[in-house]
Image (spheres, grey):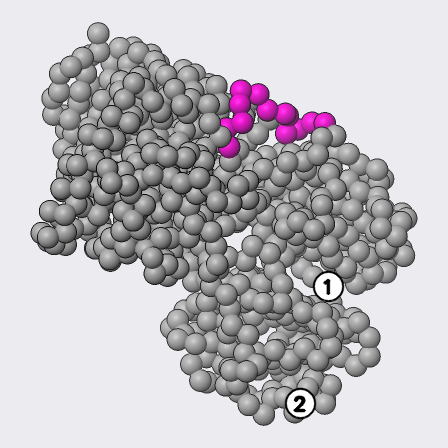
Amino acid sequence: MKLKNIWGKNPNEGFFRRTVELSKKPEKAYIRVFVDTGYELFVNGRIVASIDEWCNVRDYDVTPFVIEGINSLAVHGINHCGHRGFAFEMVVDGETVVVSDKDWKVAECEKWGWLDQDYDDSAWENAAELDMSAAGDYQWWTKPGTDPDILIPTLATANFFYGSVPKGCASPFYTAKPVEYVVEKEVAEIMGEEYVKRVNTPHLDKVHKEYTIIENNAVQKDDGIYIEKTERFTGPSFIVDMGIEVVGYFRLKIKSEKPTSFRLYYGETVDEAMGEQVREILTNKMLREEYRVFAGEHEFQSRMRVGFRYVRVEFFDSTAPVLASGFSVKTSLYPVARRGYFECENEKMNALYEAGERTLHYCMQEYLIDAVKRDRFFWIGDARMCALINYYSFADTDLFEFSMREAKKVQLPCGGVPSVYGVGTSMLWDYVAWYVIGFYDYYYYTGKREFVLEFKESLEKAVDFLISKTNSEGLIDVPENPLGDLWMVELNRFVGVDPYLNDLYLMSLKTVHLAAQLAGDSASEKKYTDMIADIEPKVAGLLSDDYLHKAYDKTEHMQIQYHVGERDINMGKTARMTERLMKYFATMLDAGATTLNECCFGEEYDKVTEYTGKTPSYVSWCHGWSAIANVLLPMGIAGIKPIEKGFDKVLIKPDFETYKRFKCVVPTPKGDIAVKFENNEFSYRIPEGVSAEFTFAGETKEIAGTGKISIK
């Protein structure tokens, strides 16, 4: 295995690839790469770094990117002028496993899918070997990764946008296998073929190809968009409408005899795609990409994953005509089965459930991220709500477990948890509480004792932080915001003894009490028992007189909207909960949205499908925690809620007044609970091992297996 300088036939660029099989996940993996005069480096389809400069030999720690089995290595080599060359070496656990040589395949232009492990490159040519003097020969006398002064580490995070510093993590998103869930016969008989069909129907195809062209000032022909002449920096441009919100990597074919430049402007609304972003803010970097490609016919795929419906494609600085065609999106979805379900006679509520499921699914990426357009962050408080929605929709646990293990790594010495995953981020008190509460939900929905115990110390530290904020009455007292409008102590900006935050605090105490019970820690269990007994009546007093509804019926804050809705259900006011969903959530769909906004802004929204000329707000129109209806409807209308860990015991207390017909499936670790109400008859299927209490008209009885109950 001898290192060589290699290249292809195109003097300006080459698209190089090969695969390497690893017998196990490495402890450490390093890559050294050089390309005169720049490169894009990919491992398993994930961009490691993008460099466009001379003297660019780099060592990268790529451990988070590699996997056991087949790994794809891909390099886009760029040569602006002069001699050219590409040199590469990969070291795994101290041994060289790949070098650049004639065994690499090379193409002259980009091809869709060339980054993938299963791409067929058999028609590609083998690379030509050149003299090493053009590839930094003298810099290869040591092995990659052996000199810490030149090693570039990978930041353990999601690749929100790409650059010279690698970002990556070993998320189950990259290793999860496609899920094919077999619907049990009893569930299928109650729910029907429509449900069976949708369970394994993805929200998006692997490549989404549906689109229309709007706002076009180029020339549209049968074979694509023809750009005969471009100005220096001013177009022409056109907008590709994908028809629905999508998440992934935008694709297009570009054919030109000369190099050409183009920009991509992403938007979840037409206003966003049409608007010119303020260059000095971070959102600009998230929603705008700029590329230059060399002559030829490229099957181009954007390097940054984005959530969008519209993308404005603007060409500039091209000295020859350009033909653009083949618009599509290589989608990015975590593999889950769509086991949860809700349907009733209210079509808007059905559409809201479907939009909520899609919204949450899109936000299940490397972590349970908040949104796919902006911020693309793992907001730790958002994850609690996203996980709860996930349990009712998909019953996945791996992504939450990975996300929480990462969150624990950044917990502060004071016990507080940053609101966003990362070092040097802000902290919100309610987000600390949600971090803790997420484990209470997890235990009741999964029954996994070991995972909760793994976090016992972390949860106690977080609760100690909250305890440190209490007053002499044992309640959290929120101070005046020291930052003014710059940020806040908690999202709802309450000052004083906040009833909502103190309810979260009480839930946090119950979570660490649960952890102490599971661990057999009698001293801690007694400590938290006494604290709960002291503050529970005080919190009840704060929440009396229907406080949450009166204070927060109309609030932008999605976590509070859920809290108010859940309290309505517990108070027997399910109809009021559904009225709020119709008023503040279904109206998002009336605006043309196919996913849900990050905030409740009111009862009316500007149409996402129309150009108003307003300055785009750049709020997120696909925000995971907004899918609260996907918990509230099964919990409130179908009345399904676990009352013992892992659905060992479940309460089924349906609301037969709000809707006269409904179907619902709630996935559990023991199988799916399915119920149907129509023609005054309630049908049910309870999985084996689940003890179910059915409550109606003040009476409770146990039900099991399958059956029907007349409701009059």
The residue at the far top in this view is 712
Q: Amino acid at mark 1?
A: Cys
Magenta part, dominant SS: loop
Q: Amino acid at mark 2?
A: Asp
Secondary structure found at label 2:
helix
The part of the image, by quadrant, that contains residue 671 is: top left
Q: Are marks 1 and 2 in contact (CB under 8 Å)?
A: no
The image position of residue 274, as x and y in percent, is 73, 37
Q: Give me the disc on residue 137.
A: 2
Quarter of the picture holding the N terminus: bottom right
Q: Is residue 606 magenta?
A: yes
Read off the magenta span: 599-612
Closer to the camera, 604 or 119?
A: 604
Q: Would residue 181 be seen by someone viewing this image from the given angle? A: no
Q: Give me the disc on residue 109.
A: 1
In the displayed structure, 364 sits above or below 53; it is: above
The residue at the far front in this view is 472
The image position of residue 664, as x and y in percent, is 32, 26
Q: CA distance from mark 1 to mark 2?
A: 27 Å
The part of the image, by quadrant, that contains residue 172 is: bottom left
> Measuring 58% from the left and 51% from the top, which residue is drawn there?
305
Closer to the camera, 617 or 622?
A: 617
In the displayed structure, 637 sits above or below 454; it is: above
Q: Is residue 367 magenta?
A: no
The part of the image, by quadrant, that contains residue 109 is: bottom right
Secondary structure found at label 1:
loop
Closer to the camera, 575 or 545?
A: 545
Mark 1 is surrounded, within 10 Å at the Cα level, by few (under 14), some (14 to 19) or many (20 or more) other residues, namely: some
> Measuring 65% from the left and 40% from the top, which residue is drawn there?
267
